Amino acid sequence: MAIDFRVRPPFKGFRTAFGRRGGSTESDEVLIEGFIKRLDEAGITKGVVTGRNIAGKSGGPDIVVPNEDVAELVRKYPTRFEGFGAVDVRNVPKALDELDKIAGLGLKGVAFDNPWSNPALYDDDKSLFPIYEKSSQLKLIVGLTASAFIGPDISYSNPAHVQRVASAFPELTIVVPHGSWPWTTQIAAVLIESKLRGASNIYILPDVYLNPPGVPGRQDYIDLINWTFLGKQQLFDRVLFASSFPAQDPLDAVRDFKQIDGIAPEIRDAILFKNAERILGLA
């Protein structure tokens, strides 16, 4: 059993946003049914469908998956998918209104790619704070994508930015797709600090930097998962499994994760599905 906490399936706006529409004549229904079969093969019982609203990435056109598309997929397959919407962070009043719509659509969270906005924003940019505050009020989980390839330079993935958001909004649940790679030691320190101040509101999804072998820094995530500090504190309960499809095929992601040596079965299960069940309110 597994919950894939970040998928962008071949359905409606996702096909355009992720460049997979091309000349395909297959319908959304055919493609999504094939995708669900792939999830079944992988033993994935639920996927978290993550929307996107990137405002003029690299000076190009906006990349938008309408929140209505995410909600439609969740509505059609309520036992298979949970949804995260997205907002245009350039227009704060509009974003705040959109958060109400996201909550009204029954979506569980809102995804941000702030370093890819135009202009690029660090996650702790004060212009974003009203959006985080309302997300917290609406009990929406916030996804802050962070890796070396998200934004103009590596400084945008420094987990200090996430740490400042988490400190400012201790009631806000934050997930970090790509796990702040390559700042692997630093994100471990952020998770420790979060636990020690009693907030524990940050979760990481190391996805393609943890699942496949050979990735530089992968062992740091494995050490983070297995480490016990202060005699009893652990961090594995702040790690979530994800393929970030189409970044990795879900079947490959589950296979690669299960082949990691040295992770106890109970810890493996926590990462594969129990941690996700807890923060999604499914347990």
Image (cartoon, rainbow, N blue to C red):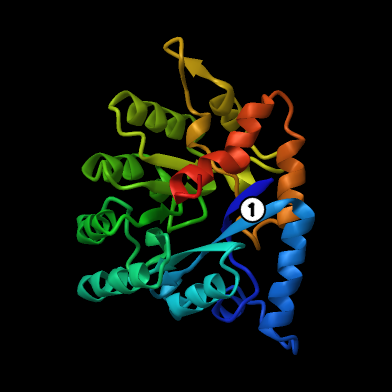
Q: Where is residue 204 shown, x and y percent of the image?
A: 49, 42
Which residue sits furthest top? Answer: 231
The answer to which of 175 and 232 lies nearer the viewer is 232
Q: Amino acid at mark 1?
A: Ser
Q: Is residue 102 above or below residue 139?
A: below
Q: Residue at x 35, y 62 (%)?
A: 120
Q: Where is residue 136 shown, x and y percent of the image?
A: 27, 53
Q: Residue at x 20, y 55 (%)?
A: 126
Q: Is residue 188 above or below residue 16?
A: above
- Mark 1, other Cα within 10 Å: few <14 / some 14–19 / many ≥20: many
Picture quadrant of residue 12: bottom right
Q: Residue at x 42, y 71 (%)?
A: 54
Is residue 222 found left or right of 163 in the rendered image? right
The N terminus, quarter of image: top right
The answer to which of 273 and 159 lies nearer the viewer is 273
Q: Where is residue 176 shown, x and y percent of the image?
A: 45, 47
- Note whether residue 82 is visible: yes
- Note whether residue 60 is visible: no
Q: Residue at x 39, y 50 (%)?
A: 156
Residue under numbered circle 1: 243
Secondary structure state at the residue bearing disc 1 = loop
Q: Is residue 36 above or below residue 141?
A: below
Q: Is residue 224 above or below residue 275?
A: above
Picture quadrant of residue 247: bottom right
Is residue 244 found left or right of 173 in the rendered image? right
Is residue 131 found left or right of 235 in the rendered image? left
Q: How many numbered tags mark residues here?
A: 1
